Image (cartoon, grey):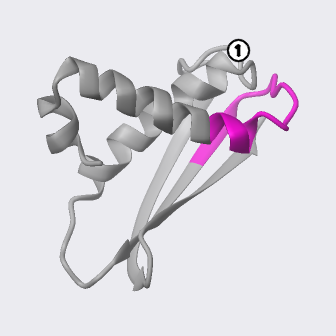
Amino acid sequence: MTLNVYRNLHPHLLNKFKKEYGRKLEKIFNKYDLIDKPIIIHVLMHFKGKRRRDIDNHATVVLKTLQDVLVNIGLIPDDDMKFIKQIVLSGQVDCEETRVVIKIEETT
C-alpha cells in the first residue's frame, strides 16, 4: 500500500484496509507491556525487485497505522511528539519478498 493508492481509495475500502492491517499489527504488538518512556521508531522497508521507490509513499501508511495501533492497544499513551521522539526510515532493494521490519527503542 502506498500513499498514492491510500489517498485515492474509496472510504469503505480504506476503512477495511485500516482494520485488517491494524489487526495484524495488534497480533504482533499485543504481547508487549506499556512503554511509558519516549520512543524512537525504526522502520526498515525491504523491497522486492530493482525498481526505484519513494520511501515516503510506502512508509507513511505503515507509520500512521502502526502509531494508531500502538495507542489503541495501550502500548504507548499517545502518538504525539512527547512520546514519539524520532522516526528513522530506511529502505533496501534486496529481497525475495517485500516486508517491513519495525524496531521500537525506548529513550530517555
Question: Residue at 40% across / 68% down in the picture?
Answer: 91
> Image check: 85 left or right of 13?
right
Quadrant where the C terminus sits is: top right
Q: Say what amino acid the circle numbered 1 marks.
A: Pro
Asked where in the image residue 41 lies, by quadrant, the reply is: top right
Toward the viewer: 108 or 5? 5
Crowd around label 1: few <14 · some 14–19 · many ≥20 (10 Å): some
- Where is residue 89? Give x, y as percent: 44, 55
- Where is residue 43? Give x, y as percent: 52, 54
- Where is residue 23? Give x, y as percent: 59, 33
Q: Secondary structure at mark 1?
A: loop
Q: How many marks?
A: 1
> Image check: 9 left or right of 66?
left
Magenta stretch: residue 57 in it? Answer: no
Toward the viewer: 1 or 45? 1
Can residue 83 be seen here? The reply is: no
Q: Which residues are magenta?
A: 25-41
Q: From what the image shows, is residue 74 above or below residue 8?
A: above
Question: Residue at 22% across / 19% down in the picture?
Answer: 11
Question: Residue at 56% across / 20% down in the picture?
Answer: 79
> Residue pushed farthest right?
33
Can residue 67 be seen here? The reply is: yes
Q: Which residue is mark 1?
A: 77
Q: From what the image shows, is residue 11 above or below residue 89?
A: above
> Image check: 40 left or right of 94?
right
Magenta stretch: residue 40 in it? Answer: yes
Asked where in the image residue 9 lies, by quadrant, the reply is: top left
Q: From what the image shows, is residue 101 above or below residue 2?
A: below
